[in-house]
Amino acid sequence: MVTSSVPRLVIAAPSSGSGKTTVATGLMAAFAARGLAVSPHKVGPDYIDPGYHALATGRVGRNLDAYLCGPELVAPLFLHGARGCDIAVVEGVMGLYDGAAGEGELASTAHVAKLLRAPVVLVVDASSQSRSVAALVHGFASWDPQVRVGGVILNKVGSERHESLLREALDASGVPVLGVLRRAAQVDTPSRHLGLVPVAERRSAAVDAVGAMAAQVAQGCDLGALEALARSAGALPGDSAPWTPPAPWAGKRAPVVAVAGGSAFTFSYAEHTELLTAAGAEVVTFDPLRDEQLPEGTAGLVVGGGFPEVYAGELSANERLRKAVAGLALSGAPVAAECAGLLYLCRELDGRPMCGVLDATARMTERLTLGYRDAVAVGDSSLAAAGTRMRGHEFHRTVVEPGAGAAPAWGVRTPARRVEGFVQQGVHASYLHTHWASEPGVARRFVERCRTS
């Protein structure tokens, strides 16, 4: 049963690279080892950290993004994920007060903490400071009176002497030290061009890493004090209720919607599958690296984000599946592709043949494209009616040429006006990652098109 007073903590930091993921994931696993049912959450659009959270808790990691979904959905989505849980841990994004560019506090960790009325634990990289840590913590704790910094965890502490200096400096700050973690290379996780390597690509090593994080947090942190702080969270606003997908459509045929998974396509929000199911689809996951055919009876296809550039050779070698995808698209069946899915539908990626659904080529570059986008559907498609406004997020080091088809998917309004993506027959392909909970009608529209195409 979900209550609006579910115990909860937000794990934040002054900046990226301070150790939020290590602490948050380790704390989730340590709480779970104590027999608590832990609800894992991540602020922002990140797909990779929730995979580690899921390993730590045995539950699906869920995102809380006030830009993609709107502030009004943060608490309902949180409560949806926290059903049946004893405690929730929310990992922040970037620095505590860093939000969407040019949008003030919107989508920052501080913003989400306020929407959830949750206490914040500040993770500080103390490796290159001693007494200055008190000024840093004081500044973050006092910047916004509506943000309650209830404790600090000192990370990358070098020695007992270093720890003593840090604790002495923080004694006068009024913010208790709830944990001290020493430098520990064994809890590091490998990264590449878009961040951490996803769990699906290193399952055994990821399990070991999460275990090491849990051991370090359990040894270095006061779990009792952290749990007590979580239980001090006040009730959410009185009108907050769990988000629920629209009720399933009864009495209609359940079309099979194939959803790409496996190591090459790991980026997806759990709510997308829930919305497709609620709209009456039978969702079947397949692996484009291994499966040579689409699931039997496939009437629609969803190919989300991931790392096709890493697996381009293997994806290209699976010629039978590439032809099956191209045939499905040619038949007019609905196909929704985001970022990695867009690359997979191109004629080629880094010179290797892909599905050839789109008359476009894709290649890796050194340039990172990153940021939130405000977009509007240019025309009707299997995913959205013309004029539908959605917010999205771009995160890639690839380029597709041309960047838009004769019928673009989106008109992007920020940060610069442009058209982007492709709509042809039933295909909707774009670089933009979107969160369908913000516009549940897209899932219903997609499934209905699967019924009638």
Image (tube, rainbow, N blue to C red):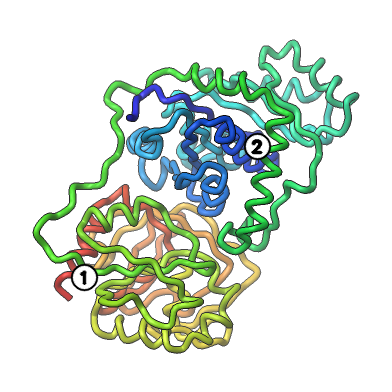
Mark 2: which amino acid? Val
Please name the residue that numbered disc 2 is placed on. 23
Residue at point 44%, 45% (across, down)? 62
Question: In the rendered structure, which disc, 2 or 1, sits on the residue that comes first in sequence?
Answer: 2
Image quadrant where residue 321 sits: bottom left
Residue holding disc 1: 450
State whether residue 420 appears in this view.
no
Q: Position of residue 347 (x, y in %)?
A: 45, 86
Tell me if 166 is positioned left or right of 222 in this view: right
Q: Is residue 334 left or right of residue 193?
A: left
- Distance, label 2 to label 1, CA atoms, is 43 Å
Q: Nearest the camera: 57 or 154? A: 57
Tell me the quarter of the image containing the N terminus: top left
Residue type, numbered disc 1:
Cys
**Residue at horizontal 49 percent and vertical 27 percent from the top:** 8
Question: Looking at the figure, which quarter contains the C terminus?
Answer: bottom left
For the point 51% across and 76% down, the residue is 289
Residue 161 x %, y %? 90, 24
Disc 1 secondary structure class: helix
Q: Is residue 450 left or right of residue 236?
A: left
